């Protein structure tokens, strides 16, 4: 809760007039406790998990002609009933695992010092902190993901996430409850190392989940803005990991590809791309009828 009763008090404390964004923040947050503001994460997660994958569902069910060619595994088609079941399972996890965890984890946010007051962070401050959050989460997630692909980790926990060999947007958070808890640690490490404003924390939660939905979308759109981000994996990169399945020892990265490159865990993917490139370069009469259904550009 802000320690000011009026905008004039806030302006006097800052020694300047509030920006437009700070005025909006004051009007919205002045009467709300820090705990209530933190719990907004639950609403954001629910909205993202429910709404962001919907266009992908429409594309999968309606098979819009112009977009169908961007499907990475075109031979795999999930019926609407399967996608609905996936959503229900994710919502069960949300209401009984993720939501309660958010409600009780506020003391940790207090401990690391995420603030809710004024001034708001500058755009550059937010961008730099978000970059740290993504890099820290990506590196730690890489090693946890590799661990989950050993015999014990896969059979006991990670196999649930790999039930979808051709992933869909709703399947991004679809996982064993233990995996949901474990992967919450990398997501929190960045904000713990470089604590910022609650607005930055909200942005981190929202962007990370949207990114996860994109990489599990099953579609590789050439106009996706993330294609301009250096070392970004994207849908096609992660789709290969699901396509290979439980025996996959390639493409463990959650966001960027540098860990896979450094530690040599992208070799299967690179080999597959070379094979497909050769097949695509051969005359149509020479190819063997398309026994491989994993698409790449």
Image (spheres, rainbow, N blue to C red):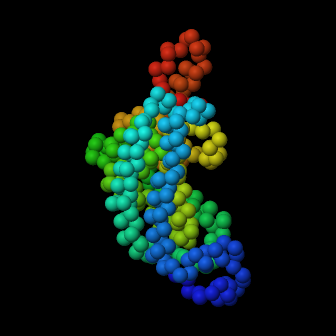
The answer to whether one can see residue 189 in this image is no
Is residue 240 shown left or right of residue 245?
Answer: right
The answer to whether one can see residue 103 in this image is yes
Give me the residue at 63% from left, 77% from top.
119
Task: Report the residue that reaches farthest toward the right.
Answer: 16
Task: Report the residue that reaches farthest toward the top.
Answer: 285
Residue 63: where, in percent of width, then height?
A: 53, 33
Give me the residue at 66% from left, 65% from top.
124
Give me the residue at 42% from left, 36% from top.
79
Of 98 and 127, nearer the camera is 98
Residue 197: where, in percent of width, then height?
A: 56, 71
Of 88 and 285, nearer the camera is 88
Of 244 and 225, nearer the camera is 225
Residue 150: where, in percent of width, then height?
A: 32, 43
Task: Identify whether 154 is placed above or below 287.
Answer: below
Tag count in the figure?
A: 0
Give me the residue at 42% from left, 42% from top.
83
The quadrant of the image that shows the C terminus is top right
Residue 193: where, in percent of width, then height?
A: 49, 67
């Amino acid at each position: 809760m802000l320690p000011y009763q009026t905008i004039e008090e806030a302006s006097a404390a800052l020694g300047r007039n509030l920006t437009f964004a700070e005025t909006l923040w004051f009007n919205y947050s002045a009467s709300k406790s820090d705990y209530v503001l933190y719990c907004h994460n639950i609403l954001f997660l629910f909205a993202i998990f429910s709404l962001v994958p919907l266009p992908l569902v429409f594309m999968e069910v309606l098979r819009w002609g112009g977009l169908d060619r961007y499907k990475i595994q075109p031979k795999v088609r999930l019926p609407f009933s399967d996608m609905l079941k996936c959503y229900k399972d994710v919502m069960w996890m949300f209401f009984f695992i993720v939501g309660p965890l958010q409600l009780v984890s506020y003391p940790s946010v207090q401990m690391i010092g995420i603030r809710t007051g004024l001034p708001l962070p500058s755009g550059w401050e937010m961008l730099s902190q978000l970059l740290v959050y993504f890099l820290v989460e990506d590196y730690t997630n890489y090693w946890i993901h590799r661990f989950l692909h050993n015999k014990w980790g896969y059979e006991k926990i990670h196999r649930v996430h790999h039930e979808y060999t051709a992933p869909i947007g709703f399947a991004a958070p679809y996982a064993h409850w233990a995996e949901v808890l474990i992967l919450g640690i990398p997501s929190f490490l960045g904000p713990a190392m470089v604590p910022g404003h609650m607005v930055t924390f909200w942005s981190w939660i929202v962007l990370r989940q949207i990114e996860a939905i994109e990489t599990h979308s099953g579609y590789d759109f050439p106009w996706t803005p993330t294609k301009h981000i250096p070392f970004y994996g994207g849908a096609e990169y992660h789709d290969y990991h699901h396509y290979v399945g439980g025996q996959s020892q390639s493409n463990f990265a959650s966001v960027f590809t540098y860990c896979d490159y450094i530690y040599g865990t992208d070799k299967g993917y690179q080999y597959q791309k070379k094979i497909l490139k050769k097949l695509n370069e051969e005359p149509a009469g020479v190819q063997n009828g398309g026994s491989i259904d994993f698409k790449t550009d």
